[in-house]
Amino acid sequence: MSRAQRRLLGQVVFYAFLAILVVYTVFPFYWAIVTSLKSGSELFEAGFWPLAPAWNNYVIVFEEQPFGRQILNSVIVAVSVVLLSLSLAVLAAYALGRIAFRGRRLLLFTILGVSMFPQIAVLSGMFELVRTLGLYNNLLSLVISYMIFTLPFTVWVLTTFMRELPKELEEAAIVDGATPFVVVTQVFLPLMGPALVTTGLLAFIAAWNEFLFALTFTLSSEQRTVPVAIGLISGASAYELPWANIMAASVIVTLPLIALVLVFQRRIVSGLTAGAVKG
Amino acid sequence: MATRAGGAPPALSALTRQRQKSAWLFLAPMVIVLALVAGWPLFRTIALSLTDANLADLDARSFVGLENYAFLIEDPDWWRAVRNTAVFTLASVSIETALGLAIALALNAHFRGRGLLRAAVLIPWAIPTVVSAQMWRWMFNDVYGVINEVMLTVGLISEPWAWLADPALSMTAVVAVDVWKTTPFMALLILAGLQMLPQDCYENAKIDGVHPVVVFFRVTLPLLRPAILVAVIFRTLDALRIFDLIYVMQGNKQDTMSMSIYARQQLVDFQDVGYGSAAATMLFMIIALFTAVYLTLGGIGREEKA
């Protein structure tokens, strides 16, 4: 085989790998969309294109359960979690990133350690707490409990970001007599837009997807969040699961997420790597 | 800092003291919340694991010492859950690393449509875990699933496989979904590592006419090791606590039951809070051990000192 032929073969193998990769990553969601548009016996044939799109499945999802309410629940919980963790984390990140104080290292280690906690390890203790506070079957229980995974993460990423802000800005503000609180809120916060969007988005996705706490701390379908609703849609037996409806519900809650991720692609990637590589 | 502090001691140390005071003021809300949602529940879980507490009436409990742990290490179902979790972690993390490395190398090459490909790779990561589990459960359906359909058509199998019901296949199916879902994360972390590699090594190798495969094993892989190690540790810790993916796909089935699923079943389904908390505490200790090893091995300590 000549050099040119080998080169060509290499190219063919490379592009074949890329093609397989795209099919592998995209096909399952494509299949979910196709399934969500099938009805009746069409569902049980492997047609790769819905012949007569059955939009009705999307209507049924909202009729058979309070799905609109559940989406609203998820939005309320995720947005509250994001706002609360970002506001706590910005202050903490300033202290951790820019002030040298005794015990900083230990605190950073502890925060990293908490982010490794398995959720199940706090489940019974958290359940007791939720019940004592009278928050069982209340969305507030989720807002509080989700802090365990969003807070360490936002603190960590914002701390790495805070460290990289120019020192001169802060010094100038201090010379002008600014208190640390003013430095954070008036000087640094306006510069942190991109970092806040990235960490906020990642925290939003984590809260939007959470399953175990939502499954345990809520009971009625009016208080359920989307992942629990989709995870628990069931029929009389495994063979009677309403697959088209499950897929319709899945598509509804996933499309906005995919759109968000694709729009903020670069930021998300940098946020993920800042959380891990620098961590 | 030290030299400057020597230059103007009183003013600066006053400022430093004021800053340190405000540091704790700024940290207080975060520390209090973390103590409330992480420290306290963890402490209570460990405390409850030493009692015979029941979910129906948490207050009517008595201290039983290590009895729950004694039962736990005698329970073959617990050990099965430990083994399942170990198999799941080992299989998924190693496949994800190999595949993630391949994808990262491909994404690092220059070709048209690279941005599009990177977007495609992100899609599985963007899909909620519960949704991925349901999607794949449908694709793995033994009668109507598209996977069996395609494999039958291509001729890979002669009759439909019961992916989710057959004990010999269900773990494979679960691992396959986890690999699909989390390889993008792995690939992105490794890609970030790849893009930070010094380019001059490669130019030298190119000039010397070293074969690309040799370059990969002699240059790329050793330089990439820290990035891969971090990614592997993150994924391992995540895989050890796996719950939602397996629970939605398989429920409480024994063949795929992980430690988290075992603990939740005891806690919620059987209402045995004491025993379930003991299982949860065991999982916590295993993960704490891994984390401690990671913190000692990882570069964080060194970076902090600098």
Image (cartoon, rainbow, N blue to C red):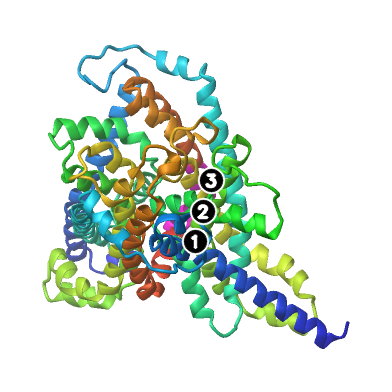
Nearest to viewer (mark 3 / mark 2): 2
Q: Is residue A108 left or right of residue A196?
A: right
Q: Quadrant of the C terminus of chain B?
A: bottom left
- Badge 3 local density, few (<14 within 10 Å), some, or many (20+)? many
Q: Is residue B294 magenta?
A: yes
- Judging depth in this view, the residue of B2 and B138 nearest the camera is B138
Task: Give the residues in magenta.
Answer: B291-306
Q: Is residue A141 left or right of residue A242?
A: left
Q: Which residue is mark 2?
A: B139
Q: Given the image, on which type of amino acid does mark 2 rest?
A: Met
The subunit carrying tag 2 is B
Q: Label 1 near label 2: C-beta < 8 Å?
A: yes
Q: Which residue is mark 3?
A: B174
Mark drawn on residue A28: 1
Instruction: Name the residue furthest front.
Output: A41
Q: Position of residue A259 (x, y in %)?
A: 35, 71
**Does residue A16 appear in the picture of this structure?**
yes
Q: Is residue A72 left or right of residue B261?
A: left
Q: Given the image, on which type of amino acid does mark 1 rest?
A: Pro
